[in-house]
Amino acid sequence: MLFCHITSQVKEDKHQNLLSQRGGRGFPHLAFLDAEGLLLAVHNGQRTAAGFDETVVKAKAFVDLRKKAEAGDKAAKLEHFLQAMDLGHFTADELRKRAKELDLGKDHMAKVEAACLNMEIAAIFEGVTQDKTTWVPAGKKFAEMKKAGRVPTDPSVAPNFWVFIMEYAYSEKDAPLFEEGLAAMKERKARPQWVEAQEKRLAEIKEKK
């Protein structure tokens, strides 16, 4: 069944967080879900009949893998878990519980922890609006994560993580923290105009110190 969802940012409209909950980052976002609303595959190819068919094949392959895992196939269980993790099927607690049950190795556990971190960050993002007064509290939480050594590397998450840290640092007049965030953004090839504006803010903080 086709389902068209429009993110209107009107609170009364249903499913306003559906796009982000299913991993969407832009418009239009095309994906295949099962009857329970679980993501089966995201369409990233050509928007043609042939392109859609390729994504349908991926969705069916995931369903077949899930059946094998449910039937007790050990290799299928691991592969299903990893693919389901990438598709966002689990909460952070569920991820860690299932990872423990599967007795994952070091490399897989690193992926699990990275996924859990991204989910925690996404939950904080949900409280952020265009009102910049919401940016500082988010930045404070991200700064605490950074202090604990928990820094995202996902390119869809990391930029905002550092931008909000910089907003918090600016509010606290914390030049070293602001400078660290700016350096991270430079590594990610932030726009020169934006970098120039932030360097002026950094100079302002240092002057006030």
Image: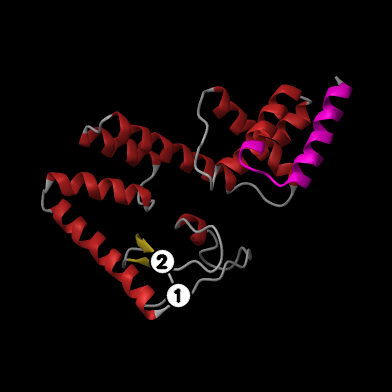
Q: Where is residue 190 in the image (x, y as percent from the top left)?
A: 67, 44
Quarter-wise, where is residue 136 in the image? Answer: top right
Depth check, front residue: 183 or 177: 183
Q: Where is residue 66 in the image (x, y as percent from the top left)?
A: 21, 56
Classify the position of the N terminus by image quarter: bottom left
What is the CA distance from the residue labelled 2 to the residue labelled 1? 8 Å
Residue lying at the far bottom of the rendered structure: 49
Depth check, front residue: 31 or 194: 194
Q: In this view, does 194 lie to the left or right of 142?
A: right
Q: Is residue 100 left or right of residue 69?
A: right
Specify the amino acid type for callout 2.
His
Which residue appears at 74% of the width and 49% of the height?
A: 131
Instruction: Please state the extent of the stretch shown in magenta in the rendering.
Output: 186-208
Specify how the rendered protein is coloured.
Answer: secondary structure
Above or below: residue 164 compared with residue 61: above
Residue contact at pointers 2 and 1, CB within 8 angstroms: yes
What's the mark number on residue 47?
1
Above or below: residue 75 compared with residue 117: below
Q: In this view, does 64 lie to the left or right of 147?
A: left
Specify the amino acid type for callout 1.
Arg
Secondary element type, mark 1: loop
Quarter-wise, where is residue 198 in the image? Answer: top right
Above or below: residue 68 compared with residue 162: below
Secondary element type, mark 2: loop
Q: Name the residue under label 2.
A: 43
Q: Does the magenta stretch include residue 137?
A: no
Around disc 1, counting alpha carbons within 10 Å, would you say few (fewer than 14), some (14 to 19), or many (20 or more)? few
Which residue appears at 42% of the width and 67% of the height?
A: 45
